[in-house]
């Protein structure tokens, strides 16, 4: 697999620290939020197909790949829904700069499937579950039902992505006879710099099989 995914000429990619402050409120705030979400979803498309391709030679059941192919298609659906919403509001993906930090997690876990599952679905996508419910409420409150509907679709799908991550992470730990919670904490400490930040959406995480014993201990140690 290539080290970097192919990208359109726009948006301009900036290091996270050089990103201009995002507009808040009003039409431009709405567009800025949709734009940053579209960028995250485009990265999610790349991350998923990178997972499928990079680890294609691993001896895992075929259903492993079936799950991630489904995820890849759903990430593409999310990107398309957001891009369409940007167009409805008179903007487009590429109109604003976007940050270049999202591929780091892929680079640091390029040689280790267990680490990749720990960091992408079980840290980053689980983080999405923490944040989404508030975003949905806010969008509805400000009269943007169309965006809220899209975010609800994404939230529902992302719960399944975390569940796939938890299922296959446990499978790999089982096979190497390691304790999944201990292994998770070890891998996240090694491969994820940001630290895990509460509040957590414990219910949604648990529904996806990611119980607090996995992530709670990481708050104190990395936060
Ligand atoms: Fe997504
Ligand atoms: Fe996802």
Image (cartoon, rainbow, N blue to C red):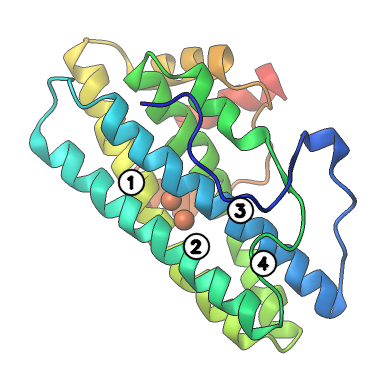
Q: Is residue 168 above or below residue 78?
A: above
- Tell me, yes or no, if residue 216 can be seen here: no
- Image point 73% across, 47% down: which residue? 12
Q: Residues within 10 Å of mark 3 (few under 14, many from 20)?
A: many
**Mark 1 or mark 3, which is nearer to you?**
3
Q: Nearer the viewer, mark 4 or mark 1?
A: 4
Relative placement, left or right, of 217 versus 112 is right
Task: Tell me the distance, in whole angstroms, between the alpha carbons under discs 3 and 2.
Answer: 8 Å
* SS of the residue under disc 1: helix
Give the mark, 4 or 3, whose residue is nearer the N terminus. Answer: 4
Label located before the other in sequence (2 or 4): 4
Name which residue lies at 34% across and 20% down.
114
- Determine which residue is flagged by label 3: 39
Mark 1 and 3 residues: CB-CB less than 8 Å, in contact?
no
Q: Quadrant of residue 183?
A: top left
Question: Residue 36 location, x and y as percent?
Answer: 68, 56
Label number found at residue 163: 1
Residue 41, percent from left and from top: 52, 54
Determine whether the beta carbon of the residue marked 2 sits less than 8 angstroms from the nearest atom of ligand 1: yes
Q: Which residue is mark 2?
A: 79
Give the residue pinned by disc 4: 34
Which SS class for mark 3? Answer: helix
For mark 4, does the 10 Å Cα neighbourhood hold few (<14), some (14 to 19), or many (20 or more) residues?
many
Q: CA distance from mark 1 to mark 3?
A: 23 Å
Distance of label 4 from label 3 (alpha carbons): 9 Å
Q: Is residue 51 above or below residue 146?
A: above
């Amino acid at each position: 697999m290539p080290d970097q995914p192919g990208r359109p000429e726009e948006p301009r990619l900036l290091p996270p620290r050089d990103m201009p402050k995002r507009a808040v409120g009003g039409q431009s705030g709405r567009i800025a939020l949709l734009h940053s979400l579209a960028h995250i979803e485009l990265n999610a498309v790349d991350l998923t197909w990178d997972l499928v391709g990079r680890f294609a030679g691993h001896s895992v059941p075929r259903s492993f790949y079936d799950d991630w192919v489904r995820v890849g298609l759903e990430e593409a659906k999310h990107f398309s829904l957001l891009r369409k919403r940007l167009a409805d509001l008179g903007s487009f993906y590429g109109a604003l700069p976007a940050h270049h930090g999202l591929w780091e997690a892929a680079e640091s876990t390029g040689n280790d499937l267990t680490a990749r599952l720990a960091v992408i679905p079980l840290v980053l996508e689980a983080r999405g579950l923490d944040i989404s419910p508030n975003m949905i409420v806010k969008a509805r409150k400000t009269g943007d039902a169309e965006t809220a509907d899209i975010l609800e679709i994404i939230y529902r799908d992302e719960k399944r992505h975390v569940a796939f991550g938890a299922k296959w992470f446990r499978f790999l730990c089982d096979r190497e006879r390691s304790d999944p919670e201990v292994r998770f904490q070890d891998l996240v400490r090694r491969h994820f710099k940001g630290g895990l930040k509460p509040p957590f959406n414990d219910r949604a995480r648990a529904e996806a099989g990611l119980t607090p014993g996995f992530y709670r201990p990481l708050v104190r140690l990395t936060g």
